[in-house]
Image: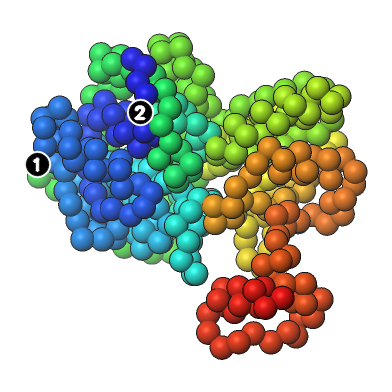
Amino acid sequence: MLKQIEGSLGVAQAVALCRPGVVCAYPISPQTHIVENLGKFVKEGSLKDCEFLNVESEFSAMSVAIGSEVGGVRTYTATASQGLLFMTEGVYSASGLGLPMVMTVASRAIGGPINIWNDHSDSLSQRDSGWLQLFCESNQDAVDTHIMAFKIAEEVGLPVMVCMDGFVLTHAFERLDIPDQETVDKFLPKYEPREFINTKEPVSIGAMVGPEAFTEVRFLQQRKMAKALCVIEKVTKEYRELTGSKSGGLLDCYNCENADIKLIIMGSTVGTAKDEVDRLKTQGINVGIISLKSFRPFPYAAIKEAIGDTKQVICIERAFSFGARGIVCPEVKRAMEGTNCDVKTVVAGLGGRPIFGTTINGIVKDALAGKFTEEFTWYDIDTNVLNNSTLKDENVSFSQGPIAQSVLEKSVKA
């Protein structure tokens, strides 16, 4: 059914259609509207047989989610930014125990300084946590991916993060096609837990494992991740055949045939890039876009096939690794080992700084002109904010107080 609604409401409706037994909720922008709506559904009775639990922190939300999954109940929660960091201990425990919960990460920058706007630093900080991480490029993609995520999680036996851009998607109103309950029930079977406590056959879950078996535990966890690549594709195919959706999958290619250069992008920036690529095509510049949907597990074979014999690839990244370089780029380089493909990182859009069509245009033309001589480029640095003297002199002194305040004071004086 087509509805003109906010992205967060669309996600809440999609989650409700999956019939969770427990929703653990702690508000943090920009995911708050999702759990607020789920709470409303439970209270009014449209979401039946579901316990909505208000908790006192994000750590508690993940702890309750672990407890409810161990109790044999389909479970959902949501978070963002510092909230995701606060629940990190539990995040690792959930995957290590093989608990197939689903969590929305409404991606937002990590402080300090405090920044509530969108980038991917929160979700990508958990890339080694053992969760599947699926990225959405639109609200329709988010609706469909949440429904698929429950089935993927339960078939693989690992938890899934559905990562959607905070505010850019969560608070945007657009026309969404929400499937009906009958369709979702046909797609997603009744929950049959694997790892759970049964009072008739008592076992310990999460007990200590020593050196004699810990490597084997991690081996099995990695094997589930490898299996997830096939499961994601299988579940996507099933969902598309049932609903006519175009969402999901490991990645999506746009205008990639015979492209002179390919951009690898995650999240809502893909839509902006597609519009600009269409404009560039009228100028005789052929640019392909690879929308990376599954970051964990990383689809090395699919990326290599999508890049093909293209010689130049730019990863536009909305996060980076301090003291190193990009986060997506090294994975792409690994996929292209043994080829002469030149893969580079361009960091843009941190902390909610917008990526316009003109930004994409500039990146493409600078890349084709050979201006990216280093593997890692900060593309949208504002030298007026940073202050030219700071760029020239590494020993420039800052006034006492927060770094951000000091930078802004110097830019004003300049």
Characterize the local packing of mark 2: few (<14), some (14-19) or many (20 or more) Cα atoms within 10 angstroms.
some
Q: Position of residue 192 (x, y in %)?
A: 24, 30
Characterize the local packing of mark 1: few (<14), some (14-19) or many (20 or more) Cα atoms within 10 angstroms.
few
Q: How many marks?
A: 2
Q: Amino acid at mark 1?
A: Lys
Q: Position of residue 207 (x, y in %)?
A: 28, 59
Query: Can you identify the residue that label 1 sits on?
Result: 200
Toward which corner of the image does residue 171 lie, by quadrant? top left
Q: Nearer the viewer, mark 2 or mark 1?
A: 2
What kind of element bears circle 2? strand
Image quarter (top left, top right, bottom left or bottom right) of the C terminus: bottom right
Q: Residue at x 65, y 41 (%)?
A: 356
Q: Which label was assigned to residue 5? A: 2
User: Is residue 21 depicted above or below 125 in this figure?
Assistant: above
Toward which corner of the image does residue 86 lie, by quadrant? bottom left
Q: Which label was assigned to residue 381? A: none
Q: Amino acid at mark 2?
A: Ile
Q: Position of residue 123 (x, y in %)?
A: 48, 51
| For residue 316, side relative to residue 214 (left or right) | right
Q: Are marks 2 and 1 in contact (CB under 8 Å)?
A: no
